[in-house]
Image (spheres, coloured by chain):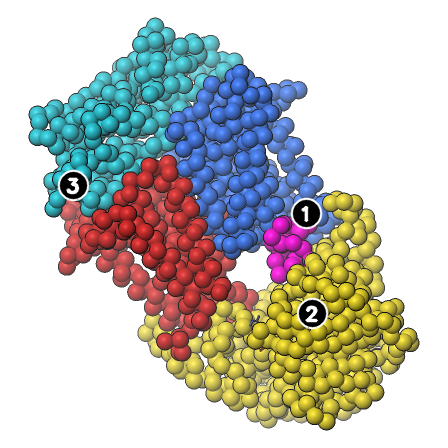
Chain colours: A yellow, B blue, C red, D cyan
Amino acid sequence: MPERMLELRGISKRFPGVMALDGVSLEVAAGTVHAIVGENGAGKSTLMKILMGLYPQYQGEIRLQGRKMDHQSVKQALNGGISMIHQELTYVPHMTVAENIFLGKEPCYKLLKWIKGRDLHARTEALLHQAGMDLDPGRRMRDLSVAERQMVEIAKAISYDSRVIIMDEPTSAISEREAQRLFSMVADIKSSGSTVLYITHKLDEVFRLADEVTVLRDGHLVETCKVEETDTEQLVAMMVGRQLKDIFPKRTQDPGPEILAVKNLGRKGVFRDISFSLRRGEVLGIAGLMAAGRTEVVRCLFGLDPYDQGRIFIRNREVTIKSPADAIRLGLGFVSEDRAITGLIPCLSVRKNITLSNLNRCAWGPVIVPNRERQLADQTIADLSIKTTNGDQRVSTLSGGNQQKVVLGKALLGQPDILILDEPTRGIDVGAKSEIYKLIRALADAGKAIIMVSSDLGEILGMSDRIIVLHKGTISGRLRQEEASQEKIMKYALGSTRQ
Amino acid sequence: MIQGNDHSFADLLQKYGLIVAFLIICAVISLLSPAFLTVPNIVNVLRQISINAILAIGVTYVILTGGIDLSLGSIVAITGVLAATFAHPNTHPLIVPLLIGISGGILIGIFNGMVITRFKVAPFIATLGMMTIARGGALIISGGRPVSNLTDSFNFIGGGDLFGCPLPILILAGVFFFSYFILKNTTLGRYIYAVGGNEEAARASGINVTKTRITAYAICSGLAGLAGIIQASRITTGQPNAGISYELDAIAAVVIGGTSLAGGIGSVAGTVLGALIIGVINNGLDLLNVPSYYQQVVKGLIIIGAVILDREQGSK
Amino acid sequence: MIQGNDHSFADLLQKYGLIVAFLIICAVISLLSPAFLTVPNIVNVLRQISINAILAIGVTYVILTGGIDLSLGSIVAITGVLAATFAHPNTHPLIVPLLIGISGGILIGIFNGMVITRFKVAPFIATLGMMTIARGGALIISGGRPVSNLTDSFNFIGGGDLFGCPLPILILAGVFFFSYFILKNTTLGRYIYAVGGNEEAARASGINVTKTRITAYAICSGLAGLAGIIQASRITTGQPNAGISYELDAIAAVVIGGTSLAGGIGSVAGTVLGALIIGVINNGLDLLNVPSYYQQVVKGLIIIGAVILDREQGSK
Amino acid sequence: KRRSSERDGVVIGVSLLNVSYEFIVNIKEAMVIRAQELGVRLIINDAERSAEKQIQQIESFIAQRVDAIILNPCEVEASSPAVDKAIQAQIPIVNVNSETRSVPTAFVGSRDEQSAEIAINFLAERLEGKGRIVMLSGYPGQAAEIKRSQGAKSTLKKHAGLQLIAEQTANWSREEGMALMENWLQAYKDEIDGVFAQNDEMGMGALQALESAGVKDRIVLVGVDAIADALKAVKDGRLDATVFQNAKGQGSRAVETALQIIRGEPYEEAVFIPFELVTAENVDEYLGTGEK
Ligand SMILES: Nc1ncnc2c1ncn2[C@@H]1O[C@H](COP(=O)(O)OP(=O)(O)OP(=O)(O)O)[C@@H](O)[C@H]1O
Ligand SMILES: Nc1ncnc2c1ncn2[C@@H]1O[C@H](COP(=O)(O)OP(=O)(O)OP(=O)(O)O)[C@@H](O)[C@H]1O
Ligand SMILES: [Mg+2]
Ligand SMILES: [Mg+2]
């Protein structure tokens, strides 16, 4: 066995109302990739945050290369040689890429801690180049797409040259091409003798990357084993406590009449000439590489951004959508890719978030009827098996995946005829994913029309009845389910318009 | 009580923390001054806080949306002067000055809200501008002099008793229950919290953010108009220089009461408790005849101390 | 100029928006009053804004971290009184009152910062408490009376000229360049922006958020101490009731200058421009002899208008 | 250095303590009326209680080269540089209403100590030399507050039977005066015999508190300034007394003096307009004096 890098002994952590971790012990060797999997809310992120010094109050002991660490601050962890890609992206929006990457470790003169601006720029450029990222170090974080921000986070974690690099769902927001680049970085880190702790809900990544895998469930460690000694089914069984088969359900109904038609929709500088139609009972997949403009198209459709060209028809009537309120009135529902910004009100309870768009369903005039509201929300919590102590828990204290389910629940409560899902399973565990797929299919079979934007090709192929592929803001290809394949989608996504 | 209530356990503890602080302050004062815990003095304190508490409840709406209103004190002055101008004996029935005062406040609030939402001016600047505009307006209308000689019925609002209880206290109670209900049990209240909690997400949920914001400012300034009427009536004069820096006391009550200036978190119950704490401190220091220079030091320390006690409790 | 600069084009436009507003205001005033665009009056305006601009630059640090400081005016009073107490003729060399004034300010800032970071008291409340504490302190130290009879060298700071330029203007220039450098080119500056921009991210990057915050409050109050000395020297008296509501003017300058009260966005260049706009409006309205009640209305409207112009330009 | 007068007639710059105080408004209006009669243009600025602002305004007047300045000082010490600057710039400056340490070209006003002296003497007389009194004082540290407190305390020394049991600031404001009096009535229920309010605004607030508590009959109350409301209250027998300060006289005299100086005519360097006690007996002489 190679040198022992990291040792966790009996780590426990309690939050008000929940035991997030209960006596987790783990050993990780140097020069390996150790995957950590588990359902949403299993405690993966909490364990990593403790390791990173973000939660100074915990029980247990952490040893790095045999030395005991008293994890009191992030600074200590960073100095000790641990860095982390956070699940909820943590960046300063108004700062540039370079400033964010070197935040807290700016190259500077001793005198007055004067920052060497040129150095900063040059080093960022080198780093981004090394990571194979084509990004201007001077751009501001707030102007980047979610995927680009994720890439910057990755570059930042790498830039510390740490002995232990934690990656908490690093691929949840990026597409296949970027993920490939990340994987080769992981390989480089591994061969340099450092260790990677890798959290993911995409189990194929475990087998592609990891040497060992640990399964957590409800704060307990279920098992740690070598990757060769296990397989997907076994892992899933350990995670969710049961077998899981056929995660993509089959269509049982034929599509109904057309409900939505989009003609030559365009927004200056972002996308143009977007035309498609949608029938009841249909799932339309929108694929494309990162920053292809998929999110922008669906945001315009939902009235979050203005469009300046084109026409939209719903139920054969031309409509104008100027605000989300218009869209909701017309029977649209939307689940955004960015739950923290467009999805949730963090300081409100789970219940209040779920009912926010549909208070009219539980109100008498302007007065909310508490029992009606509780009933509606609890129904949603049960339907989507959202893991929460009760409906009164603040939504910001839910695990990432469960927050995603709240956003979905909110949109579903409006009983929309057309449901737009932007990366609906981002950060959701396999068990819950299959629930959501079942739900999507059930909704479609019940006559709803669904638009699903996704970077997960498996999901696109498994769920869509028809697929459109975007490239640089235009449609570069259309595929029916029967003819679709990974290769075809990728070819269109890269910009080729001919077969 | 915990079950079925939409406050988490930590929230409850936090609220109790403030109550504990309040009780400690009361206990200390009543040990030092026998006059403190008497019915007349309690009524006295309640009457004295009524104006600040009404203003504070109003600005709670605005702060919950993530805004702020610095024009409150000036609104008290201009609405007081306006109402007084229409309250001279043998001119108009009582309802006229009341309507003019309150609707004057509401109009100012709508103006504030429009400047903030349509022209995207930071609430701090928009209402700071309104602070000097309304003050100037009050001085112009009154010519810089107190507007006195008002009808008895007008003076009854701030000075009279009903069922043995001073009217301002009853008005405050009404405003409190009304606002408690609005914020807790109506869609408007929910939207106010949502807008303050995450504006972008509120918009994406189909909420008319602009309308919600403007409504919050309108309610806030309307209540300031009510406070202006009570104040003018209580001192039987419309004073153009009334209400200077009232906004700070009102905002202090809100923040002491646990409402976050970032918006989205808080309650009017906390606000009233905050106003009570400030009122009791003022009253106690006067009762104990603490020399006025030291009063200020002690008052500042107690307020900070009360909030610390609150936060410590809450974070346990 | 755009390339290599860390301001986006929109930011530049926004900054120009404010400059345009400023130029329009100047143009209108100078058309109406020939006295406005004369060298003595320009020097006059610069001297008049110097205290507010120094305070505003100081509070820019704090606002950039997402905080606020309401105790500025009181710090001006207490440090002015303190410095004056040590500036009587034939007692101490000039350096003593200067050091005492500035370090007094710094200590208050550290206290504010500790209360805010260690005890998690909202900056609004902590500094509001300090506002009354420091005011009380100023009254206690001075016994409520102006502290006068100061040395000529002390009085020179606020009243004297160097190379034909009033000293307060030179001090302001020094403070500006120093702060511009600190905020733009040092790690401290970077951390201040980071803490205000996203505290979580700052913490996750290993930045000592507590230390950064406290430092910002200390610099802010230290500069308020400097302003207190200049003020006392200018009025040749340590005045315990000096500086009332100076904090509002200072914060207004910051916000007009484009700094966000939410933290993370802004610059001291904007702040100085904001202070200039306020100063020019005050000066212009006085020069034009606008009746004082109307002055307030006009001033409020111009400030709101300038900010609207700025935002409109920026959003094009 | 051309003076304004050479361009467009005589211009006098006026910096006032605060034009939202009724008493100052009265001075201002007297000035405006007298200036109109004399054909003089006034530039009136409001210092909003700040000495610093007052200095700035004087600097602006100097930059405009006005013919003379009338200063209604905020502070004794802190407004002195304003006077020095005017004198240095060789612009005549007339202090109105209250004094500064620096000596102006001329002074028109009263001694604030005297108002408190008159008021305390009145209380002593009414209470027959014996009783407990409370004092509501003005904004702490301000010239008028300091002098009225000084005047009250030194006069109290002459009346051994009078005991000052509490003093507290109500910041010149009616609503604060009312709240303070209410609190005192809780603390010293039956102990208070007399009340001295350093201005009528606070006095009117205290009066209302005393009346609602139903104790006005046995407590003597006196204010200062003789604002319209106070005179009316004296007339109605609600307020026992106020101390008249001749705003009209001060305002018009200040304009006259400034004009005399500008024209090089002889003028009085110090015009003291005494305070006068106003009670029910003589109130009719004063009614209407404060108003236009
Ligand atoms: N600050 C907090 N306060 C209260 N409870 C919390 C807090 N943070 C996490 N939790 C709870 O702790 C549990 C573990 O959360 P954690 O974020 O570690 O899950 P996870 O395994 O990372 O899930 P996911 O895959 O969804 O990211 C969850 O039940 C969550 O609700
Ligand atoms: N808030 C924003 N401000 C400015 N530009 C943005 C913003 N968000 C996205 N963009 C830009 O718009 C383009 C399209 O981004 P969008 O998020 O729509 O891509 P996408 O196809 O949905 O891909 P993904 O969701 O994988 O990022 C990109 O060039 C991106 O950089
Ligand atoms: Mg997680
Ligand atoms: Mg997207």
Mark closer to the observer (1, 3): 3
- The residue at 45%/46% (across/down) is B128
Q: Where is residue C303 in the image (x, y as percent from the top left)?
A: 41, 50
Locate the N terminus of chain A by quadrant.
bottom right
- Residue D105 can be seen, yes or no: yes
Residue type for callout 1: Leu
**Magenta-highlighted residues:** B188-212
* Dot 3 beta carbon under 8 Å from ligand 2: no
Which SS class for mark 2?
strand
B204 within the magenta span: yes
Q: Position of residue B282 (x, y in %)?
A: 49, 33
Q: Mark 1 points at which residue?
A: B188
Dot 3: chain letter: D
Q: Name the residue under label 3.
A: D7
Q: Name the residue under label 2.
A: A311
Residue type for callout 2: Arg
